[in-house]
Image (tube, rainbow, N blue to C red):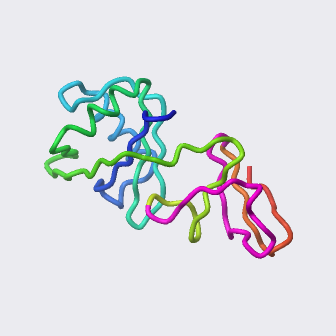
Amino acid sequence: KAGRTVRVQGFPSELPPDRAADKLTIHFLRSRNGGGDIADVRVLPGPPPCALITFEAPEVAQRILKVKNQVLAIGKTRYPLEVTPHAAELSPDEVLRGHGSPSCSHTDSVPSRQLGKGDLPLSFHLNYAEIHFHSYSNEDFFPVL
């Protein structure tokens, strides 16, 4: 995934995540927007919400980043999008550490072996699998499938 993922903000927060993903997929597939084939779209909660869009080829992500004005049109309303590189490409032994649930503005990654008992996050998400774990105490993790 290295170099293929961009972070997108600016779409309306009232859109359900699946609808936001659909609208962003259509927008970033269009060649007139600099887009191309998309491998994955993940909409993360906010505030503000954002999306991580992974393209099939890194050249497409680089081209998207060079487009000055990305504007998402939904009906008659136009939403200026902020598109930035997404640097956090996680390996399987890393976790996203955040304040509450994973979001674009409040997560960082840390090698899982560096998490100590006193440093356990309240919530973490394994990027390579769709499994979420929530800590209800500092000692027990319960998978949410």
Q: Is residue 145 left or right of residue 17?
A: right
Q: Is residue 122 magenta?
A: yes
Residue furthest out toward the right = 139
Magenta span contains residue 108: yes
What residue lies at 68% left-to-right and 70% top-to-bottom?
Answer: 122
Task: Tell me how many marks there are.
Answer: 0
Residue 107, how many percent across, how many down?
53, 61
Question: Is 21 positioned to the left or the right of 31 in the image?
Answer: right
Q: Please, is residue 140 above or below residue 8 in the view?
A: below
Q: Position of residue 101 (x, y in %)?
A: 58, 64
Residue pictured at 22% horizontal, 45% vertical: 72
Give residue 57's quadrant in the image: top left
| Residue depicted at 45% across the width and 45% down the height | 18
User: Toward which corner of the image does residue 105 lie, by quadrant?
Assistant: bottom left
**Residue drawn at 33 percent across, 27 percent down:** 60
Q: Is residue 52 left or right of residue 67?
A: right
Residue found at the far front of this picture: 114
Residue 76 rendering spot, x and y as whole percentages: 13, 48
In the displayed structure, 71 sits above or below 110; it is above
In the depicted structure, whether residue 101 falls above or below residue 26: below
Relative image position of residue 49 (x, y in whole percent): 40, 59
Q: Which residues are magenta?
A: 105-129
